[in-house]
Amino acid sequence: MRIHVLDASALYRYLTNGAAEEIVARVLMDAAAAGNPVLMSVVNWGEVYYTLAKQIGLNKTENLMIGLADKLPVSVVGVAVEDAVRAARLKAQYNLPYADAFAAALTRGQHVLVTADVEHFERVPKLRLLKLPRAKKADA
């Protein structure tokens, strides 16, 4: 059973019809059809929230994000102390942005991370990636 983990760039692209949103849509559809969750750290969920809020305002963002929970097979995973330590180690070892380290930590070396931030995550050995193409200036 293949489990995917979304980072903020992947969900953001999906929600804004950005570059390669169809790849993220396929991951979500395949997961729903197989009855598998797609995982996302609550830290990365928050990244998407604040990025959208800056662009479309808090009210629209709130309505959009609340509706997602019922529509998508995404399981938002909270952060325990062990998760924070795992992310901090990845940040320290591979100089990942801290929020990205939570996405990498959530894979636990077993799941596939869906990301457009390839240059960050390629630093981490044995991290399995589903690489989204580079964005145009308007995409994240």
Image (tube, rainbow, N blue to C red):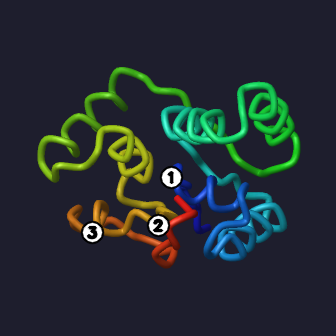
Q: Quadrant of residue 50?
A: top right
Is 136 on the left-hand or right-hand side of 25?
left
Whichever of labels 1 and 3 marks the residue nearer the N terminus, that label is 1
Question: How far across and down, in percent of the image, does residue 48 sit?
Answer: 59, 42
Q: Give the spatial CA distance, label 2 vs label 1.
A: 8 Å
Q: Residues within 10 Å of mark 1 (few under 14, many from 20)?
A: many
Crowdedness near tag 2: few (<14), some (14–19) or many (≥20) residues, C-alpha within 10 Å: many
The mark closer to the camera, 2 or 1, is 2
Query: In the image, what residue occupies the spot 42% across and 61% down?
Result: 110
Kindly identify which numbered label has been placed on residue 124: none
Looking at the image, residue 54 sits to the left or right of residue 67; the answer is left
**Crowding at mark 3 (Cα within 10 Å: few <14, some 14-19, many 20+):** some
What residue do we see at 28% from left, 37% from top? 86
User: Horizontal placement of 57 versus 10: left or right?
Assistant: right
* Circle 3 SS class: loop
Q: Amino acid at mark 2?
A: Ala
Q: Is residue 77 above or below residue 30?
A: above
Q: Which residue is mark 3?
A: 122
Q: Is label 2 in contact with label 1 (beta carbons under 8 Å)?
A: yes
Which secondary structure, mark 1?
loop
Q: Which mark is residue 116?
A: 2
Q: Which residue in the protein does label 1 denote?
A: 7
In the displayed structure, would residue 37 be above or below residue 55? Answer: below
Distance of label 1 from label 3 (alpha carbons) = 14 Å
User: Residue 6, image x and y in percent?
Assistant: 56, 55
Number of marks in picture = 3
